[in-house]
Image: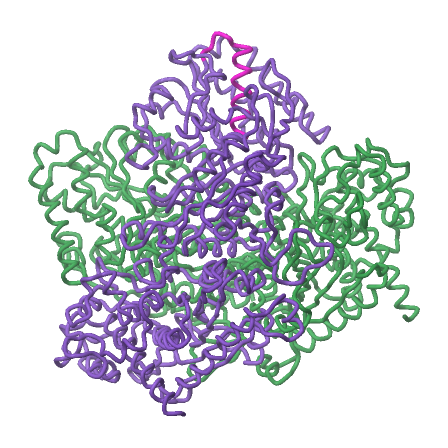
Chain colours: A purple, B green
């Protein structure tokens, strides 16, 4: 080893020991942080909660990256897959100085170190995982599997950024992580940043071995090469080797990796060059003992290098003097007296290893994306409006109309916005975006291919996990995006949504975390139009799932037609720190509102449609309410039937766009006051409510309202099958004829005089069912229905042509 | 090619053409199934819905496997990953004869073929995917990604079975599938069957290319070898090659694969042998054009071999004569006159290729698991009871107690029951099972390892997707199991649960599908005990998700203590065709009921706990209701406080074990009548309800009840943090002191005379919070609380020792 390398290695080792010392201190100590007095049991926490096993490895990599960043002046983020190593990343941020800048009460002295230790896994403190509270992190480490997708999301459109992503060998067994390796096929070496995966094989999960650590090394290399990487293998600490021996090896491996990244980024046509043996994206495989540098044996059983090191190696420190002594010996083995000065601050040499300012991984502005967030350049959505000469007369495909708007959003924001989806962009009728961009594709491209390019901004892969994970990483680093998905299959990312919503809820209370763009879902191909896909594709439950999360974070919109979808989408794209769920069909559906009417309606979120009502300001006999495009169509048709057949019945039609408006204002920021609710829904008239999803959600949102006792909700009740659009609606009693029957049955006194109409409605239902079974399509009376007195026509919507104002739109920020 | 091979190839080709013909017919034709008259537009369906692209490949593999099965007399199941190829698998089952046996109206003649065609993607018919209606399938093809996990689940404990699993290259991009390749590390060559993955690279998803079809072949081979397989590559139809040219190549590849399977199964210590270059599990990589044998070009654009073949290649057959002609030409290209006899039945030579009886893949009894289902041998759960000398005096760890029961379930059922979980078996305190078995592990085993063995029956991998997928495959082929998981992370499989629940709902209406064992979840490490993990681990929403599915399928149990958990678990393990969700904590918690009391209570599902109530048969002043172990503890403690401080207040304590009891009987089979509900909850007294999960679920279940207007629910409201058991409860107002305040605020007239008590409760809350913040643990008054007059002790539960009757238990079926 050269003299310089020796000095560097020794400095890295000191930094590593300091981080390990601070990690152990967090897990164990209430007081005496610098061990300036002999350790006694009252210095130890009463409940020992935390995860040691993965921590020393995380600290080791962090220390070494500090060296590389300093030497090469690089912009590097650190994504921590083995999230249970929270104490390590907190320790590193403390050594960097960032922690004390963000949390001044955790100062760089003995008192601050005491606070650092005490808060960890302690009531009112921080969790044992890397979490929103951890400076430098975009990846909550509680639920495993998303680090690599987050890393790629962060790298997209950040050509100067290198994202170092440590992947635990436990995490590597998850589906999301296993799929994420192939993200490199959608990464452009010239436009995007680099991701350096560091697969950390410490061999064990909570209580068993990991697969990747136990397969033959040749198989592991083959696997990683198969994923398209060039793996660089490093190991240390095996068979009792001294910890410090790893430093030159790991330093050399990292230098090799960063050199290779430079080579890849310098390659034109990377996919072809790679196929000819050119440079490949590198990755590191780091094999070290679990719980390295911790107790080797406890009570006669091996701990270091086994699953027993996963959480707290010494569990009875307060109760057993020999464990107290072992803890003290363990902590002193890091030689804290050489690492911290008389005040308890890290000695100056340690600060020399850490990069400066925003080069510190814990202070990298990409990891606090709101700092870098630029406003999205948005064309005027009104320019994409479809003409609606009269309500319920013309039809349009809502998502097709939206596609044109999104095309120009992409054009206006060439490095700041992407569209994500599992190969459903075209299926969901958003194909207009391909006039502005392509699908991102870094692998081979054939002559017969269409709309593929390494610089494409449509991110398609048949993995909802990857779409969600990339988008999260992209948003968390300060950009904008939209995830379009089949409604039923968005449940695949229920748990990822949970974690992102929790992240947003926590960051709202962290003033130093700046607001980021909202996570926007467009759910199309929804429950009511799965004509050949049938029951497996029918699931509207994501709304229910979302509604369980914190009200300050979640928003759900069900625009009834194309113009409303435009208005809602524009609103969502401008919002911050929310999760917005938009549900809109892709099939031709009637349109109801002009653009100006749609804006007013969507702004209110709920409203009476006077053109469909005949209560004319007085109290109605019945309220017909609806939420969602297909339920709205059936409700409007029911209103027309009632007005035709029972002209003296006063009907009020209410449409709900913003579902959270139904909740009390005490429960959700969008919630209506009782006065507002009562003015719309009355306090005593029957309400027949047609809901897009499971009917009980409407009850759950409204059970405190005065008129809840008169509320009758129709929705999807898991009665699905392969059938036609009207037939599936009938199967769930959500059809126009059934609503008329509902009204007859519920308006006092009506049943007696409308018996004939009731029977007629029953007959028409049966006739429609019979027609469908015989012909394989819906009866023309329902299929082609329009509001009485108008003729249906397809709207030659403007969106088919680029609006005049859009072609020359310039990004507002260049 | 030898003469015999030529004959076989020609027969396989005829079979393939017949299956393709029947597939195209399903997508297009209403009538004229045998093309005995010229095709006219009225023979064509009005709505063309279906998926052609993947179908010819599925048919090709099916035809070839028929040859192998016949020659080798093998027991082979066919799992169809590219599920959109529904018409293909239906066609194959029809050619096999199975379809007509199961659905006699779809007979083997022209009329039956007409019915076969008509029903497909037609109102009241079958969906375009492989579905529960498809004989021979255990894998719903609507949502992609689960085929390989299902295949391994089917193979476990079926040593004679070979599961051929076709994996689409689209599906291969999903997380679940990507993780599934490594399932071979938990497959024992001697005890289990074999899985033959057949990766079908047709190159395209809905509208874009697939990753695995576009990476260099060397990378693909490297990847699959890295997964531990020996890939055998076959391709055909590329560059215009005639379809029939593939037959000898594919036949040879399959022979090679089946030979290799025999070699692997003959190897002792497979993992070691493999590392030394011994036989490896084989797999096939089959590269053929998408939509092979279909239209090559439509309207000047290439279709065969591109994404345009994904659904319906000719979309305007009724409208455009040239497309009608193209369809007729396409169908006649299969030479139907040589494939079907004068009555329309398949010609005799085709039947000769198909295996006989249960050897037919479409009739394999493993694919209708209920046929093979054996009763689970269950020890008497009463033998594992903990002693409960008086209520709320002793404590036990419920899942530890259950662990002993499960240990003996495993022992009694050595080839019929497995325990699945993401490395959380020990964490969830089920370690007693390791007295009876080990973790399944086919990779390397080290000296320091514990409880690993190739024949282990505990299936641990850090992938909830794999645990769920394996268990589904295991259950669907007629066995039993239980999935234990952290409560928060079970959301990872929300969508898989959806599909399984839908499968069960559909099969209930298919008399030929026999009932299978229920899918049992044990959710532990629940929302209320995530002391160091904090917010990311706090999510009780799976109950809500489950409650949206069909009432005939879903059951949710929240046993309040150890004996109740035993009773509930026994009940669930005996049940059929349900999804049972059991939520139970792993920490020491008070016990309330003796075994006999627990049985009675769990049988009723909801009941008044008279020992904690003082209403003595009269109407109470207030009902304290609770559901879940931690909410029950707080409610019981609140009842004690009320009885101590307000002795004249009549309190009734109601505990709910079976959550679905709260629903009206019209909504759920377990639902209570209004009479029953009113008798327990009264019609007019305040109810304070402490719920384990999100509070609004209780409102959703009870909004129709008379006393819903007086119901006040406390539960989890996304207020999570790192803290102590009592502190998190306080944070969500679910604590005993708050319940007393709730009662004071809600019982008419009480506030006036209990103001001092109210203040005292507020003070005690604040004091508890302050104590926690200062000491890092809960105040001993709450931590060690027992029912007044008794002293807390830990129950030396019988479960620590094997009950006398269990050791010599013999499996009831040997």
Residue A97, by quadrant, is: bottom left
The magenta segment: A630-650
Q: Position of residue A69 (x, y in %)?
A: 39, 73
Q: Position of residue A348 (x, y in %)?
A: 24, 78
Residue A234 lies left or right of residue A348; in this view the side is right
Quarter containing the C terminus of chain B? bottom right
Which residue corresponds to the image point at 51% horizontal and 24% vertical from the top-left? A593
Q: Position of residue A479 (x, y in %)?
A: 44, 52
Q: Nearer the viewer, residue B164 or A37?
A: A37
Q: Position of residue B403 (x, y in %)?
A: 38, 64
Q: Main secondary structure of the magenta part?
A: helix
Residue B742 visible here: yes
Q: Is residue B89 above or below residue A808?
A: below
Residue B778 lies left or right of residue B361; in this view the side is left
Residue A385 lies left or right of residue A338; in this view the side is right
Q: Nearer the viewer, residue B559 or A270?
A: A270
Residue B438 visible here: no
Which residue corresponds to the image point at 77% horizontal and 71% vertical from the top-left? B255
Residue B712, by quadrant, is: top left
């Amino acid at each position: 080893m050269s003299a310089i390398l020796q000095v560097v290695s020794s400095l890295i080792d000191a930094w590593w020991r300091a981080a390990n010392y601070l990690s152990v201190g967090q897990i164990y100590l209430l007081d005496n942080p610098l061990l300036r007095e002999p350790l006694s049991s009252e210095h130890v926490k009463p409940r020992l909660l935390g995860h040691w096993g993965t921590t020393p490895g995380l600290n080791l990599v962090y220390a070494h990256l500090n060296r590389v960043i300093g030497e090469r002046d690089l912009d590097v983020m650190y994504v921590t897959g083995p999230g249970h190593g929270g104490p390590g990343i907190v320790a590193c941020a403390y050594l960097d100085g960032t922690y004390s800048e963000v949390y001044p009460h955790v100062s760089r002295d003995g008192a601050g170190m005491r606070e650092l230790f005490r808060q960890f896994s302690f009531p009112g403190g921080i969790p044992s995982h890397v979490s929103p509270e951890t400076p430098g992190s975009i990846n909550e480490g509680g639920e495993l599997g998303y680090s690599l997708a987050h890393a790629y999301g962060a790298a997209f459109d950040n050509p100067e950024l290198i994202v170092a992503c440590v992947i635990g060998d436990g995490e590597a067994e998850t589906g999301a992580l296993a799929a994420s390796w192939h993200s490199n096929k959608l990464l452009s070496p010239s436009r995007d940043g680099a991701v350096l995966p560091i697969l950390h094989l410490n061999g064990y999960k909570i209580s068993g071995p990991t697969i990747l650590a136990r397969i033959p090394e040749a198989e592991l290399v083959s696997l990683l090469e198969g994923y398209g990487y060039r793996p660089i293998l490093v190991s240390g600490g095996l068979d009792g080797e001294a910890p410090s021996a790893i430093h030159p090896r790991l330093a050399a491996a990292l230098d090799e990796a960063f050199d290779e990244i430079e080579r890849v980024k310098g390659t034109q046509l990377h996919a072809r060059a790679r196929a000819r043996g050119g440079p490949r994206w590198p990755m590191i495989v780091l094999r070290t003992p679990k719980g390295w540098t911790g107790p080797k044996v406890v009570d006669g059983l091996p701990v270091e290098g086994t699953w027993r090191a996963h959480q707290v190696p010494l569990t009875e420190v307060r109760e057993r003097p020999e464990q107290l002594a072992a803890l003290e010996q363990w902590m002193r083995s890091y030689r804290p007296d050489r690492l911290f000065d008389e005040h308890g601050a890290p000695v100056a040499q340690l600060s020399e290893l850490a990069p400066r300012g925003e080069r510190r991984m814990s202070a990298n502005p990409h990891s606090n994306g709101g700092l870098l967030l630029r406003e999205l350049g948005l064309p005027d959505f009104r320019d994409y409006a479809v003409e609606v000469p009269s309500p319920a007369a013309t039809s349009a495909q809502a998502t097709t109309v939206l596609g044109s708007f999104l095309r120009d959003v992409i054009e206006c924001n060439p490095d700041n916005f992407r569209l994500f989806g599992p190969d459903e962009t075209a299926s969901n009728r958003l194909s207009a975006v391909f006039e502005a961009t392509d699908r991102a594709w870094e692998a081979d491209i054939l002559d017969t291919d269409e709309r593929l390019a390494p610089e494409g901004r449509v991110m398609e892969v048949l993995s909802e996990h990857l779409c969600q994970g990339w988008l999260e990483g992209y948003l968390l680093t300060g950009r904008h995006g939209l995830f379009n998905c089949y409604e039923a299959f968005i449940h695949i990312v229920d748990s990822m949504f949970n974690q992102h919503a929790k992240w947003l809820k926590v960051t709202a209370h962290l003033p130093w975390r700046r607001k980021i763009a909202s996570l926007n879902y467009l759910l199309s191909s929804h429950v009511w139009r799965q004509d050949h896909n049938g029951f497996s594709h029918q699931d509207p439950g994501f709304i229910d799932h979302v509604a369980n999360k914190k009200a300050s974070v979640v928003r759900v919109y069900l625009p009834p037609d194309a113009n409303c979808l435009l208005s809602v989408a524009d609103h969502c794209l401008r919002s911050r720190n929310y999760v917005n769920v938009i549900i809109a069909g892709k099939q031709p559906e009637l349109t109801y509102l002009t653009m100006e009417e749609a804006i007013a309606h969507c702004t209110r979120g709920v409203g009476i449609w006077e053109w469909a009502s005949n209560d004319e300001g007085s109290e109605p006999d019945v309220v017909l309410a609806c939420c969602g495009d297909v339920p709205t169509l059936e409700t409007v048709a029911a209103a027309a039937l009632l007005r035709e057949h029972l002209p003296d019945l006063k009907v009020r039609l209410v449409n709900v766009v913003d579902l959270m408006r139904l909740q009390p204002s005490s429960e959700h920021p969008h919630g209506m006051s009782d006065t507002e609710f009562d003015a719309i829904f009355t306090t005593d008239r029957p309400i027949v409510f047609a809901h897009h999803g499971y009917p009980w959600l409407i009850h759950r949102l409204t059970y405190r309202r005065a008129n809840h006792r008169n509320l009758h909700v129709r929705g999807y009740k898991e009665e699905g099958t392969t059938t036609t659009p009207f037939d599936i609606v009938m199967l769930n009693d959500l059809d126009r004829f059934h609503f008329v029957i509902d009204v007859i049955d519920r308006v006092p006194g009506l049943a007696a005089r409308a018996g004939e109409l009731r029977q007629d409605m029953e007959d028409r239902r049966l006739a429609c069912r019979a027609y469908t079974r015989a012909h394989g399509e819906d009866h023309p009376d329902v299929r082609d229905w329009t509001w009485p007195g108008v003729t249906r026509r397809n709207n030659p919507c403007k969106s088919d042509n680029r609006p005049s104002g859009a072609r020359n739109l310039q990004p507002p920020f260049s």
